[in-house]
Structures are given as structure tokens and as C-alpha cells.
Image (spheres, helix red, strand yellow):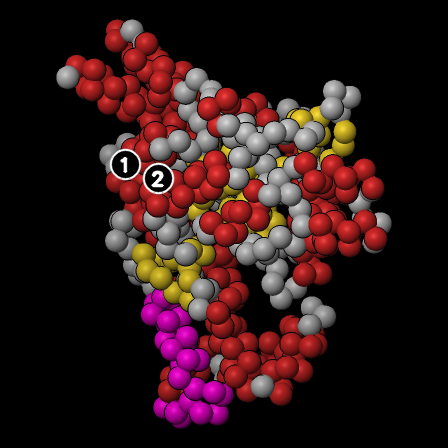
Amino acid sequence: MEDLTLDQPRANPADFAEPSAVAQLHCIDPANRADEADTIAMRLGSAQFRRDYGLRYAYLSGAMYRGIASRQMVVAMGRAGLLGFLGTGGMSLEQIRTDIIAIREQLEPHQAWGMNLIAQVADDAMERATVALYLELGVHAIEASAFMQITPALVHYRLQGLEAGPDGTVVCHNKILAKLSRPEVAREFMQPAPERIVARLLAEGLVTEQQARLARHVSMASDICVEADSGGHTDQGVALVLLSAIQRLRRELGCDPRSLRVGLAGGIGTPEAVAAAFILGADFVLTGSINQCTVEAGTNDAVKDLLQEIDIQDTAYAPAGDMFEMGAKVQVLRKGVFFPARANRLYLLYSQYESLAEIPAAVRTQLEEKYFRKSLDDVWRETRAFLATRGRQDDVDKAEANPKHKMALVFRWYFGHSMRAAINGDTANRVDYQIHTGPALGAFNRYVKGTPLENWRARHVDRIGRQLMRDAGALMLERVAALTAN
């Protein structure tokens, strides 16, 4: 729960400085450095962030598609004093409901948990319905990902948690952690909700007049997670560049760093990476790729066996199936699979031709025999039926009138097929596995080589989080000792 004073003046970040763990390192007795590593780990990041979420460490596990970031993962994190987000992308509302109820039953009221809300560019009705479900079931923390602009669903969620406190503060019950990699998007989340959207929600009876008034005094996000190059959807950003730029933007906008925190994700897989993030001023860290290779991850053992063996060079970039036409990218496993090569070829064909009919016969035969393992006509029939059941007849009509759009929808089928094959452990289609991951997992595999955590069956998401934070604390102690010795 956040408390924000009404009509507060433009903030001076120096007024809100918290005693940092880094600043306190030199005060520790050298004889007790090993014992103090965990104490330092618990002080890393923003103290207000830890208080607001009720956390032991400023360490989060991010959402991963179709429940790969599973309810078991969320529960394990919550019980350990950490925060995990359920990966709801691609899940039905009924599946999401079932998981929320299970999480609430297994965690104590004071233990932290959250849900993912992924931008639904082509299906805003699903986005609105997901928010309605979250509000119904009392979800008070969401990770908003892939948003390029503020949507009515996001504003509805944020405003429904607003109320006036007795001491002149705005109390924000619903927290939004916005995961992003562009300063212009960060700017929107650092500011209050757009007035036109607030007015629309008020007219529709979705927010009260009081909530509409209070909306002027709070930023859309409680927290910004700067996402550098990562597994899955990525803008291939550089952590050193992005984090400092968005921290500077927060200062320029005069935001109170106690109520609008900026953390880092992407490439976090070793104590060195964790320590570097906090030394750069990150208020928290969020991990992703390393958690897919844990007992709690909602994917199959065959995928985990592959991931356990990768090194830092064993990933590649491929088109993102959900944003295929836009040329957006995902980072995926390359070692042992054909998916990235095949996916990139499909995008090349889409760029070269205006319709399926234009594709040379020999190429079409190869696609049908090797990639799709069925005729493209059959793929279209399946796709058309699926869209119809989802209430997307407009998409079907557009494809029938626009051969280029039809080709995109047919090619998108391969991306859905490859994702399902990986999640379900379909060994007949192993070469087509689409496994989102980044080099951080390769670095983590090196870090735990020769230890009990080398085998993924001993990797538990909460144990990994605690060990990374504690080892980061120990590393900081070593670095400070070396500096002061000189």
C-alpha cells in the first residue's frame, strides 16, 4: 500500500535519500564480513520498496508465458519473503482464476504475490476482462508488460485502488510494476493517468468521482522495471544505458523515489550482475531466464534438460509470433533446435512476398513438409476456426480480403505450435521448440557448475534468489575490503 501526500511539491531526490547498503559496507567489522553478507543482502535496493511489498530482499521473479512462471513459483517466492508474478499470457480467464484462488489459499495475507498483465494489442477485450478478474479477486500487484502506451484497462486497475487517507494522503492499494525498455514509455508510466481515459472510465461508471480526482496526484506506476536485453520479447537494450537514462528521467520529472522505484531486469543471472545493478542504484532486481530451469517452472523436464546445458552464446533472436508483422524480436534457445532459423526464414518470406500464392512451389513444399507438417491450406482452416471461436471474425474477414494478412496469420500458426511443443514436451517436434531464454541462464549455469545446483532438479526459485542476493552481498564486502585496503 502506497501513501502519497496530496499536492506535494516537485521532489528533490536528495531529500529522500535512504541509507544504502553500499554506503554501510565500510562500517562492518572485517572479522564478521562473512556473517554480515546476508545482512547486507537484505539492505540492498529500496527500503521503501521492501516495506511496501513486505519483502525480505528486493528480489523478484518475473512473469513467463503460459504459466511457465507458475503458481508454484509464485507461492515459493512469497513464502521466502520474495515476490513472484504469475505468467498469465496465453492463459484463459478460468485458468487464471483457478491459479489466483490457489495462490491465495497457500500464502499468508502478509506474503507477497502478483499477476502479469500483458498488453493485448489485438484483443483489448481480453485485457479489460483480465483486469476485471483481478479487481474481483483482490489482486493488488501486477507486472504490466509489453505496453507501449497507457490503456483504459491499466487506468481502471490503478484507480480502483485509490482512496483518501485521513491525514491528507492518497492511499494506493493497487500497485503497477511496469516492465519496459523505452524512455518515452517510462515517461507515461511516471505521470498521472491521461485525463481523457479517466473521464471515459468515470462516464462508464468504472471509477468514482473521488478516484478520478485522486488520480491527478499519483503516477500510473508504483515501480518501473527497466528491461535490458532479456530472454523472450526484447528490444536488445543495454542495461548500463537504459537504467541510467530512466533514473535520470525520474529525477527530471521530480518524482519521489520512495514512491516510484526503478529496478533492473535482463541479464541478471550471477551475483556479479546483481551487485552491479544495486551499485548502479537499482531499487530492486527482477530475474527471468534462470527461473525457467527450476523445479517450480511450469514447463516440462525435456526443456529443463536442454536449458541446464546452455552457455552464454547459445541463444539467438527470432521474430515474435504475437507481433510478427511488426518485426518485434524474442530471444530464444538456439542450441539443439531449429526454431530460430525457421522463424527468421518465415519472416524473410513474409517480407519478400505479398501472398502465399507467390511463394515458389519448392519453398512451399518445404514449409509444408518440414515446418508445418501439413498443408498451408489446412493451417489456414485451423487458424480461421480458432479466430472464430475467439470472437475475432473481423480478423478472418480481413485475411480473406488481404492475402498479405492471411499469410501473416498462417505463419503465426508455426509460432504457436512451436511454443506448445516446448511447453508440452512434444518430443516428435523437439527441433521446433520455441524456448524463450537469454545469456543470463548460461552465466548462471557456469556460476553453479560443480555445486548441488548444477542439476536443475535441485534448483528451487526461492533458493536461487536467496543465494544470488547473499553472494552479491558477500561480493560487495570483498570489493569494499579491496578498495579500503588500497
Q: Is residue 271 left or right of residue 56?
A: left
**Relative to 10, residue 346 above or below:** below
Element carrying mark 1: helix
Residue 358 lies in magenta, yes or no? yes
**Relative to 406, residue 229 above or below:** above
Magenta residues, start to end? 338-362
Residue situated in front as seen by the camera: 260 or 372:
260
Residue denoted by label 2 = 269
The residue type indicated by label 2 comes to Gly
Q: Is residue 211 left or right of residue 367?
A: right
Q: Which of the two marks, 1 or 2, is nearer to us in this view? A: 2
Residue denoted by label 1 = 447
Pointer 1 or 2: first along the chain: 2
Residue 418 position, x and y percent, is: 46, 65
Asked if one can make out residue 455 in the rendered structure from this viewpoint, the answer is no
Residue 335 position, x and y percent, is: 29, 59
Outermost residue, front direction? Answer: 9
